[in-house]
Amino acid sequence: MSIDTNAKVVKYLNQDYTLLKEQCLSSGLLFTDEAFPAEPKSLGFKELGPESKKAKGIKWLRPKDLCWSPKFIMGEADRTDICQGELGDCWLLAAISSLTLNLEILKRVVPKGQSYDLEYAGIFHFQLWQYGQWVDVVVDDHLPTRNGKLLFVHSAGGQDFWSALLEKAYAKVNGSYEALSEGRTIEAFEDFTGGIAECYDLNVDQPFLFPTIRKALYLGSLLSCSINSSNSTEMDRLTSLKLVQGHAYSITAADRVHYNGSVVELVRIRNPWGEMEWKGPWGSKSKEWNNLDLAPEYKQLNNPDENGEFWMSYVDFKRYFSGLNICNLSPDMVMSGKVHRWSYCKFEGIWIIGSTAGGCRNNPATYCINPQFFIHLKDVDEYPNDGENGCTILIGLMQKNARKKKRFGQHLHCIGFYVFEVPDEYKGGSNVRLGPDVLLQRKPVFYTKIFSKSREVYCRLKLPPGKYAIIPSTFDPDCEGSFILRVFAEKQYTTRCHCLLHWVHSV
C-alpha cells in the first residue's frame, strides 16, 4: 500500500534536470538528449518508421531555428496553444487543452521557471504520472518539422512551444511519437493527474449526469467527450453541424441560462484542432444568444471568437455525442486546500505463469491462484447524490507499459476483476486468503462482465460497510504481466479522511 505525495518524484531514466542544465550553462553547449535522440527511431517504427513515406523530409529543429523570438509560454497557457498536427493524437491534445483550465494541475505537469529568455540551455522538463509514481521527464527542444513548420502539435500563433515539448515528453515515456497514435483522452487525463477514470455512455439515460459534470468541473476534474464512428471510413468525418466523428473533444464549462422564460442547461466544448465548431443552437454567434432573459449572461458565457470552442445545449450534447469521460483527481493533486471528494490507495501486483496468472473464473482449476487485495469500508457517504446510504468507491485495474509494447508487436491482455464480500469466518485472522469455497462457490458483489483489452478497466460501486476482496486477473490463464490496482473512496475531504478506508493487507 502506498500514498502518492508531491515529494515523491522519480527522475525518469535517472536524468536530473537541474544537474544537466547547470552542465549545459557551464559548457555553453545546448542540451542534446541521448535517451530520446533527434533521430528516426524516436519518430516511430511502422507508419513513422525510418523507411516510411510519412517520415520523409522531416528535420529536427530547435524553436530558435523556427521563429525569431520563441517563447515557452507567452503570458498564460491558453487552450489555443494546442493545435493538432499530422499525428493522430487528438485524444492527448484534448487532455492537454483541459490542463489550461486548472492552473494547479498545469503547474504540476509543466513546472514553472522554464524560458527561452533566461538561462536557455535547450533543456526542459515535465512531470507525468506513470503507473503509480510521478516521474520528472527531461527533453531537449529538437522538434520534428517539415518545410520549416512543426509537424505535430503547435500553437495558433506559432511562438509558444510548451505544448509541443510536453507532447515530446509524453512520446519519450511511451517510446516514440508513433506510439501516441490512437487512444482515449481518459488515458492522458490519468497520466497528467494520477486520477481515476469514469466513462459514461450518453445513449443511456443518466438522470444525475449534468450535476455530475458541473461538480466535476468545480472540483477540477478533467472531462472529454467524443462521437463514435462505426468504421474507419467515418473517422474524422464532418457532420452537417460541423462535429467530427471519432474525434476527442474537451469539456471546459457547464452552466444554466434563462431563455424565453425557462432554464436551459449548456455545456462548453472545445475542438483541439483550434477550429471547426458546432453550427447548431447555442453555437458561436447563434440567434439563441440574442434572446437571453438576462443580458449579463451573454457577456459571461458567449465567446464568438473562432478558436474551436463552442456552447451547445445539454440536450443536444446527449443527442450528438456518444461518450463522456471524467478523470477524478487524487488527493495529492489538491494543493490549495480546496474540498476534495476522494481518499485513495494503490496496490501493485504481477501475474506470473504457474504462480499468480490464474485467468478468470471460467478457469476453476487455476482461478484461485490470482493475487488478492482486501479493503475495509467503514463509513457511508456523507452526502449521497442518489439519496441511498452506502460507501461509494471507484476501482481501477491498469496493466503497465501498454504503449511501449507496440514497437515490439506485443498486445494488451484482456483484463478484469471480481469483488467478493469477505465471509465472517475469514474476518479477524492474519494473512487471510480466500479459498475455492468463496471464490468459486459464492456470488461476487461485482465482476467485470466483459474482460477488456484496454490499458485500464474500472467501475463505480456503492457497497455497504464491510470487508471486501478484489481479485484482478487476465481472461486467459498463463498471461504474464504487471499491473496496479487503485481504489478511490468518496467522502468530504476532512481530517477524518483516513477513517473511510482501512487497508487490511494484500497478498
Image (cartoon, rainbow, N blue to C red):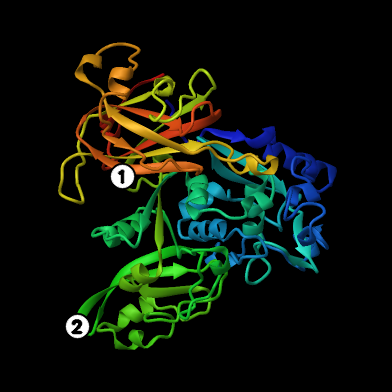
Q: Circle 2 sits in a helix, a strand or a loop, which is it?
A: loop
Amino acid type, mark 1: Arg
Q: Quadrant of residue 367?
A: top left
The residue tagged 2 is 261
Residue for point 33% across, 15% down: 432
Q: Circle 1 sits in a helix, a strand or a loop, which is it?
A: loop
Q: Which mark is residue 341?
A: 1
Horizontal and vertical percent position of residue 386: 18, 51
Horizontal and vertical percent position of residue 214: 31, 60
Relative to 135, does residue 180 appear above or below in the rendering?
Answer: below
Residue for point 47% across, 81% down: 240
Tell me the quarter of the image containing the N terminus.
top left
Q: Quadrant of residue 491?
A: top left
Residue 362 can be seen, yes or no: yes
Q: Quadrant of residue 402?
A: top right
Relative to 124, does residue 378 appear above or below in the rendering?
Answer: above
Observer-nearest of 165 and 488? 488
Residue 38 can be seen, yes or no: no
Amino acid type, mark 2: Gly
Q: Which mark is residue 257?
A: none
* 10 Å crowding of disc 2: few (<14), some (14-19), many (20+): few
Horizontal and vertical percent position of residue 138: 68, 43
